[in-house]
Image (cartoon, helix red, strand yellow):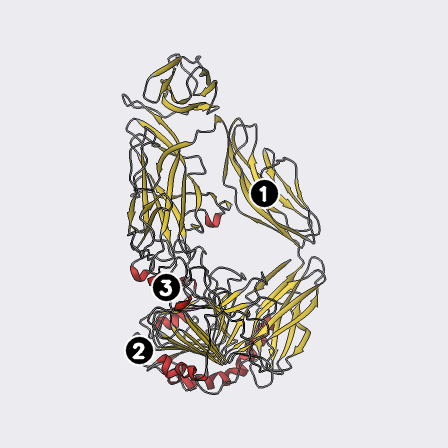
Amino acid sequence: MQISTLRGGNRAHWFLRYALLVASLLLGCATVFAQGTPNVTVAKDGTGNFTTVQAAINAAPASGIAAYVIYIKNGKYKEKISVPATKTFLQLVGESVGGVILTYDDYSGKPNPAGGTFGTANSASVTVLAADFSAFNITFENTTGVNPGPQALAINVTADRAAFRNCRFLGGQDTVYTGGNATRQYFRNCYIDGNTDFIFGPTIAVFDRCVIYPKTRNDNGSGGYITAANTPPGQAYGYVFRDCVIPGNQGITTYTLGRPWQNDASTAQVAKSNNKVVFLKSRIGSGVIRPEGWSTWDAGTDVSLITYGEFQSRNFRGNLVNVSQRVSWSKQLATADTAQYQTATVLGTWNPCNVGTSVCAAFTPSIAASNFLAVKGTTASAFTWNASWAIAQVQYELMRSSTRKGTYTAVNQLTAANDTTYNFQSTDALPGPGSSYFYYLRSTKTGLTTHLTDTVEISRTPTITVTGTLGTLTQYAGGPSAARIYSVAGTNLTTDLTITPPAGVELSSNGGATWTTAPLVLPQANNAVATTTISVRLNTATLGAYSGTITHTSAPAVAVALAVSGTRVSTAQPISGPLQWWPMARNAQDSAAVRAPQLAASTATLRKFVVSSGSAAATIPPYSARYGQAFAPQADGGWTTAVGGNGSNLNRTYYEQFTVTAATASSVRLDSLLLTAYVNGSTSGTKLAVVWSRSGFRTDSANVNGGVGPTGVFLAAANGGFATPVLLTTSSTYRFNFLNTGGISLAAGQTLTVRLYFSCGSTTITTRFALVKNVLFKGEAGAITATRPSTQIMLHAYPNPTTDALTITHPAASTEAVLVLMTLDGRRVATVHPRAGSLETQLPVGTLASGNYLVRYLDASGTSVAKISKL
């Protein structure tokens, strides 16, 4: 199955939009002039003062004391919008709520072009920081598209006295963030949807006569949460919902009315939120709210701090909801209790009805279909959508074309029988094999503005998808190269998927259990091949550089090629052993017991991070065997920018630094860095990147390029580079490669500087620490005499460890070449003169005691040392 949402449309589709825009302009203007004559107009077609909303905001005066009205004509505005704190009293007025869409698709964990990845707060499509902001007739949308998925805000409104009327907020997890302690916000006659914590934050917010739509999750039976208020201690109010509607959804996903954010086991008692949410006279769809009504966060939630309440919740038939199974610590309010939730009491001196004459006026709902989805079945396609506001006698027409820009005709239509039905379904026949159908939904009713959805595609075009790259493979003597992976999938296939490697390359589809040089066949089932991980290794007999192409075919789909390249060398694979280790259990000093003799002692240092204070509020000591080193921008575990932290964004000035220095008579090759890390109590914006330099970051820097984590080989989008960091979850060990495991060579006296960059998007003000332990550099160390300039040469010993025989590979030996076997303290055990011209020499070690030894090779071409282990 291949279903994609198309952000464009067809000529007929958009011609109709234009005609409807003209027809509805008078209705839109009536709303605009009720707010005040527009100061500027935004129009995508160039008929206004600006073509983007952000440009109009940028041009608005700073520090306003009266409404500055920006009128926005119908159109989809895909732009990242921010209202800075200086732009007070801005008022955005849309031509129609279904026609003006402010949209973007950032999400927590998505790579940020500015560096690092987005966190929760800056994933927002629209961010409002200025006081006295208001918006009318506008859709705020985040189209991340995964359900459930990562945090992806439609709006982040961290401002006092913000009002919204007749607006839609479309998203999934964390749709609407109401930010700022003691700030006041007002939502009236709005529509808000999502699937997890989709209304969250610490502010005082009133939701009057809004539709709160808990969406069907793709995992369906898994429950969701409507609110996640983290009301701060001492704040009298949190969220107040009055006369709101909570419809059922299309599936069987059930919800609770809320859970208490930052009232959990990882939050110190003194910092726990005093979560406050009440629902007054709600209308609730059948079965959508679970009987218990509310949730704790975890076993560490202090329910004595929570105020969760309801007053006269009713079903759509008007009967009181059965609340007998509500959690015991929630409240069923009496009539007398509701007096404290009047607007003037909750919002104090600010009256949102004074923001504009239509804020609290009588409301006529607009036609606006939400969540128009298409799913291809085995015999037919299924279409679902929901009304943002239920309106009787709205006619829904399913429009279809065989080409995206073709002529659309209605293939199915239905009419809403009443004003209580929110969910609708339709079906249509599948397109023919190898072809596609394109659909949009047209919603109409006399006297109301017609609404058209985006276009979706149902495809039966065979498609092969290959994800990932292989990098450069290196095959050493004695066996194939290390394996690399990529993934392949197929949709709408009519034949099996065949993967053909070039000569010299082996493939595996079972994680390396079996390998083949023959074409690998993945059978299609129900016209699809599920995403499959393919392992690739180089195993050629020809020395030198190698390149080829892996082909993926399934007629009649377009074939997909993947390049593979590498090198076959005659030398044995370099030895990789522990070189330098920082346990982080007692301090930031490396371990002398593990440090290779060729390396200098080293202490890790922090920049703009500090170790934990170890106080009762911090809860975690600065160093311990359990956690390792605990650090954050603040000693009590705070990360937010408000306390001087970097929050969810990696920052080049926030890091921990490690150095590895070769002695003045030694050379070192480092191939990997291993460490155990996570951020306690949070996975929001928790990221780690590793960057290295040979010049102390004065003239060079480079990212690690891949490695292995708790879920396997790193994907290119999260491989540990600064722009592509790994996402930290639970305590896990990570291995990062230097130069595709070929290693970094340090000449005598040279230093490798490595910086670990961390971020955390949690807004909890204490107890969040980056935890790091067992930082280990691996590779190979060797000594070079400093009596004359020396040339590094390749010296390898195998098998290593060994029991009796040892083979040493070296450059072509001259008559003066010599191999010396020594103990680690420099005592000579044996001396062997290689045969002139030979490339390898046998060393008998069977009589040696078990332990570690050094093999030194001296020749006119240079000197090198290899470390061996005798079992």
* Quadrant position of the C terminus in the picture: top left
What is the C-alpha distance between the residues marked 2 and 3? 37 Å
**Where residue 585 appears, x then y in whole percent?**
34, 42
Work out whether residue 404 can be spotted. Answer: no
Left/right of residue 561 with respect to residue 658 in the rendered view: right
For the residue marked with disc 3, what is the amino acid?
Lys
| Residues packed near mark 2 inside 10 Å, few (<14), some (14 to 19) or many (20 plus) | some
| Residue depicted at 39% across the width and 22% down the height | 853
Q: Which residue is mark 2?
A: 64
Judged by depth in the image, the label closer to the viewer, 1 or 2, is 1
Specify which label sits upstream in the sequence, 3 or 1: 3
Judged by depth in the image, the label closer to the viewer, 3 or 1, is 3
For the residue marked with disc 1, what is the amino acid?
Ile
Determine whether 640 is above or below 858 in the image: below
Find out whether the residues at labels 1 and 2 contact each other: C-beta distance under 8 Å.
no
314 vs 396, nearest the viewer: 314
The label on residue 272 is: 3
| Residue depicted at 58% across the width and 43% down the height | 534
Left/right of residue 203 with respect to residue 524 in the rendered view: left
Q: Which residue is mark 1?
A: 534
